[in-house]
Structure formats: structure tokens, C-alpha cells
Image (cartoon, grey):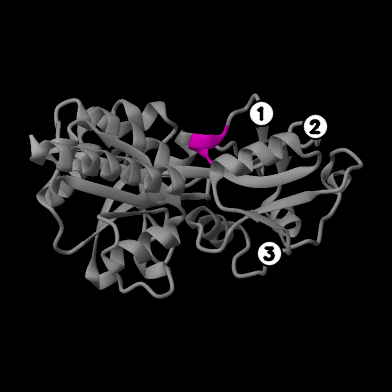
């Protein structure tokens, strides 16, 4: 009985401390059987907020038949995911960009698991009066050369640019496709797709860009570019130019449970259900391939 009295409070304190850490970081923790968890069954996936909704829901499904596995899913941006998986701080680094495209990352030390494709589109406040721009106009908006919506056929209203933070894979993808090396205008920066959607929907004149998986047409207006609509079909042929692979990077030597989880994400079960449902595109649907230098070739 003495042993029970000693260990019970410690167990409670450890439980409370663990949850305090998770709540402080904003992590999503899924753990069906904490008593049986060991080092090999703890999976932490950090990085891309564009990929986060898919991985969170896949993780939840995975638990149904894999009790004892703890999966923690966090955002933070692609740069964070890549740096943390390289350092060994996390199991999986989720990224919208190739590891070789991120400064400070040695891609040869990591294994790339491409699990989906995501399109990205410029979005504006619904009252801006604009639904289409040319690629040249879009570039001028984000470099500060066009500053009023009336210059592109919209309302006489100041344009409020909302950019993504440095290290964002969504930002890197957008700038590679649109700015082509030009410097973005100084503006407010946000670190997640979800926050950007809220700001654009509530700020008159606002413009930014979002992964397809975050675009709610009831709240924001996605823009066509050169009269090409941001659709899955147009992404698969590269007619819509702003898209990226969704990568799950691991170290060369990773746990068998992490490998099994990534295999599950790539399975037909997930690719034909959650991938499509949540606004992503299965790689098997792509008619083109893009390499780390952003060169696109037909399959």
C-alpha cells in the first residue's frame, strides 16, 4: 500500500505536466492507450499548415486499429518541420517544398515521402469586386506596384496585402510561381493558412493566398489567373501553375511505426477518401511531374 501512495501522485503530476506542454504548443495529441506507449510508438509530425488538416484526420483514423500509438500533429510551417526533423527533434517534418529548397537543410540526410499534391490560389475579401487578374497584375499587387482594386477593375479601395511568414512552404510555392525572384512588398505576415483566411474574410481590401484545402468560398473570393480557374483538374495538367507536392520527411533511419503511418497516408484507402474530401489531389491523378528546380514535365 505504501508503494501505491507514493506512485499515484507522481503519475497524476506526470499526466498533468504532459498535457500542459501539449496545450502550450497547440499540438493535436491522439493517444488511445498511454500506458503502453514506448519510444517507437510515439510519432510527432510538425510543419506545413497546408498539410496539417489531412495528417490530423489520417492520424485519428489510424488510431482505430493501432491502439497504443501516440501521434502529435503540429503546424509551424515547412521550414520548422524540415529543421526539426533534421535535428531529430521530431519524427516527421511536413513540408510544401523540397528539402533541398530550404536553406540550412541537408536533403541527402532525409527521406522524402510525397503523399499528396495541393493547389494554392490568391484570395481576396469578397467585397473587393475582383474575380480575375492576369499573372502580371498579381505580381504587381504583391510587389506593391498596384495598390488599389480599381486598377484591376474592382472597387476604389486600398489593397491590403497579407503575406505568409518566412519559412512558409506556401509562401515559397506562391513566390516561385508568381514573383519569379522579385521582392514582395512589406506587409503583415501570418504563419498559418487558417489565420490568413480569417484576416482576409474580415479585412476590407485584403488579399493573400491559401492552399485549396483552406479556401471557403462563402468567406473569401479565390481569384482566377488569366481566366484560368483554381481547380484540381487544372492543377493536374499544370494549367494552374501554383501548386506543390505535400512531403512527409523522415530521417534515413526512422521507426517502423512512422514508416507504417506514412504508408497508411499513401494507401488507396486514404488517397481515395480523405485526400479528395479535404481538398488535396492524389499524386496518381497528376498528368505532370515537378522537380526540385520547379521544372515541370509531362508524365
Categorize mark 1 by other alpha carbons within 10 Å: few (<14), some (14-19), many (20+). Answer: some
Residue 198, picture quadrant: top right
Residue at left 44%, top 49%?
Answer: 25
- Label 2 residue SS: loop
Q: First in sequence: mark 2 or mark 1?
A: 2
* Residue sitting farthest toward the front: 2
Q: Position of residue 8 (x, y in %)?
A: 19, 37
| Between 130 and 195, the one nearer to me in the picture | 195
Q: Relative to residue 21, is residue 59 depicted above or below?
A: above
3D distance between C-alphas at marks 2 and 1: 10 Å
Query: What's the mark number on residue 127?
Result: 2
- Say which residue label 1 marks: 219
Please report contact status of discs 2 and 1: CB closer than 8 Å, yes or no: no
Q: Quadrant of the N terminus?
A: top left
Please indicate, yes or no, whether residue 55 appears anywhere in the rendered image.
no
Does the magenta-highlighted stretch encompass residue 130? no
Please indicate, yes or no, whether residue 10 appears anywhere in the rendered image.
yes
3D distance between C-alphas at marks 3 and 1: 25 Å
Q: First in sequence: mark 2 or mark 3?
A: 2
Residue at left 25%, top 55%?
Answer: 91
- Say which residue label 3 marks: 184
Q: Which residues are magenta?
A: 211-215
Q: Position of residue 74 (x, y in %)?
A: 40, 47
Left or right: where 122 falls relative to 69: right
Q: Nearer the viewer, mark 3 or mark 1?
A: 1
Amino acid at each position: 500500500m505504501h508503494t501505491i501512495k507514493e506512485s499515484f501522485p507522481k503519475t497524476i503530476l506526470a499526466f498533468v505536466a504532459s498535457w500542459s506542454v501539449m496545450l502550450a504548443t497547440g499540438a493535436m495529441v491522439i493517444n488511445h492507450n498511454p500506458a503502453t506507449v514506448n519510444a517507437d510508438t510515439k510519432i510527432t509530425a510538425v510543419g506545413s499548415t497546408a498539410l496539417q488538416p489531412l495528417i490530423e484526420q489520417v492520424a485519428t483514423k489510424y488510431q482505430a486499429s493501432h491502439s497504443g500509438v501516440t501521434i502529435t500533429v503540429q503546424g509551424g510551417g515547412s521550414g520548422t518541420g524540415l529543421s526539426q526533423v533534421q535535428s531529430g527533434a521530431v519524427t516527421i517534418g511536413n513540408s510544401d517544398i523540397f528539402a533541398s529548397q530550404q536553406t540550412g537543410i541537408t536533403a541527402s540526410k532525409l527521406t522524402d515521402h510525397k503523399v499528396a499534391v495541393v493547389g494554392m490560389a490568391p484570395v481576396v475579401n469578397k467585397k473587393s469586386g475582383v474575380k480575375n487578374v492576369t499573372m502580371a497584375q498579381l505580381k504587381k499587387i504583391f510587389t506593391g506596384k498596384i495598390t488599389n482594386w480599381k486598377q484591376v477593375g474592382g472597387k476604389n479601395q486600398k489593397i491590403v496585402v497579407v503575406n505568409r511568414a518566412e519559412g512558409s512552404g506556401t509562401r515559397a510555392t506562391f513566390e516561385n510561381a508568381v514573383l519569379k525572384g522579385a521582392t514582395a512588398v512589406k506587409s503583415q505576415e501570418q504563419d498559418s493558412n487558417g489565420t490568413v483566411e480569417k484576416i482576409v474574410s474580415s479585412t476590407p481590401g485584403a488579399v493573400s493566398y491559401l492552399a485549396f484545402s483552406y479556401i471557403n468560398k462563402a468567406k473569401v473570393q479565390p481569384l482566377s489567373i488569366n481566366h484560368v480557374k483554381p481547380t484540381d483538374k487544372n492543377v493536374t495538367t499544370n494549367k494552374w501553375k501554383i501548386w506543390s507536392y505535400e512531403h512527409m520527411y523522415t530521417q534515413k533511419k526512422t521507426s517502423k511505426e512512422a514508416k507504417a503511418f506514412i504508408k497508411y497516408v499513401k494507401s488507396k484507402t486514404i488517397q481515395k477518401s480523405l485526400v479528395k474530401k479535404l481538398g488535396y489531389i492524389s499524386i496518381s491523378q497528376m498528368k505532370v511531374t515537378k522537380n526540385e528546380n520547379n521544372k515541370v514535365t509531362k508524365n
